[in-house]
Amino acid sequence: MTWVARRSARDVRGVTLRLPAPENPGTRDAGLEGGRTTMSAVEHTPATGPAGSPAEESPYRTTARQKRTRIHHLAEMKQRGERWPMLTAYDRYAAEIFDEAGIPVLLVGDSAGNNVFGYDNTIPVTVDELMPLVKAVVGGAPHALVVADLPFGSYQVSAAQALETGIRFMKEAGAHAVKLEGGARFAPQVDALAGSGIPVMAHLGFTPQSEHALGGFRIQGRGDAGERLIEDALALQAAGAFAVVLEMVPADVAKRVTAELAIPTIGIGAGPDCDAQVLVWSDMAGMNRGHKPRFVKPYADLGSILLGAAKAYAADVRGGEYPDADHSYS
């Protein structure tokens, strides 16, 4: 593989990034176009029908959806202006349901710290804790692209450490991509992963692993910080990221980032103009009955449904009504 040094015209920090030179027109093109990077489909671009419409259904629709979502599908959807949803998942049954619903991307996030393990934040989560969750989600979702979060402390030390962690998630858990938090200073980590065949989703804005450094849960990217966020996004794109999450970012800044980037943006508390949106599934389904951020819209009241079911079950057991003859063997 031939390596070339490239620098985004917007990268005012002067960070030079080493990227693989494209070997043919069908591979990922990290070249510059008008001071920004571009990304073509990593496998192929589907044929189009009349008036440029897609000749076949989007890969994540529930009708006749046969193939797994790939990163080039997401790039193609951005090119078409087609928005898509993403959810977190931590177990087989949730993965099966979300996959059947046509959710194209599932994130096994370190948000499991709060939502599975009962930690106060994501910082204590380890690779070994996430590994079985990723396996479960991959096993339950035959169509979705499954992204594994790189936990705090598993990639910050060096690009080599990031690569070792990414390889573990791919080989041992079957992940299809990984996600890491942080701006341009983590471009070498993104470069090492993407250059080794591991797709990387970046994460900017509020980054939960840096909660203490950021002073808690606070909106990021206001004022001059908005320009720095755009610079970070361009640097991560140039390093090979296939998408970037924007968390708790002003809507106007997220709109600018989305327009600047050739890769998809995924919003969570970043307004309506991102290419995709993501929510923690327990927030989306109303399972979290405590405090919810402003950007959360519950689409069900699953917490109350489960509470009612548990109370009804307990009452039947205490009253001797369960199990009855219909639920017993003779």
Image: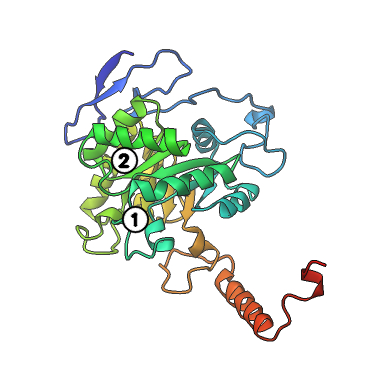
Q: Report whether 11 appears left or right of 103.
A: left
- Residue 247 image position (x, y, % from top left): 36, 54
Q: Quadrant of the N terminus?
A: top left
- Residue 144 image position (x, y, % from top left): 56, 41
Q: Report whether 291 appears left or right of 311.
A: left
Relative to residue 36, is residue 91 depicted above or below? below
Dot 1 crowding, Cα within 10 Å, few <14, some 14–19, many 20+: many
Q: Which residue is mark 2?
A: 233
Q: Seen from this angle, which residue lies furthest bottom?
A: 319
Q: Seen from this angle, which residue lies furthest front?
A: 330
Q: From this viewpoint, is residue 262 visible?
A: no
Dot 2 crowding, Cα within 10 Å, few <14, some 14–19, many 20+: many
- Residue 141 image position (x, y, % from top left): 58, 44
Q: Amino acid at mark 2?
A: Ala
> How far apart in space, not on screen, are marks 1 and 2 (Cα)?
13 Å
Residue 317 marker: none
- Residue 134 image position (x, y, % from top left): 47, 45
Relative to residue 223, is residue 41 depicted above or below? above
Q: Which residue is mark 1?
A: 249
Relative to residue 325, is residue 250 depicted above or below? above
Q: Assign a secondary structure to mark 1.
A: loop
Which residue is nearer to you in this view: 197 or 59?
197
Disc 1, disc 2: CB below 8 Å? no
Q: Amino acid at mark 1?
A: Val
What residue do we see at 51% from left, 36% from top? 74
Which residue is nearer to you in this view: 199 or 23?
199
Q: Quadrant of residue 12?
A: top left
What residue do we see at 28% from left, 16% from top? 3
What residue do we see at 53% from left, 66% from top? 298
Mark closest to the chain's N terminus, 1 or 2: 2
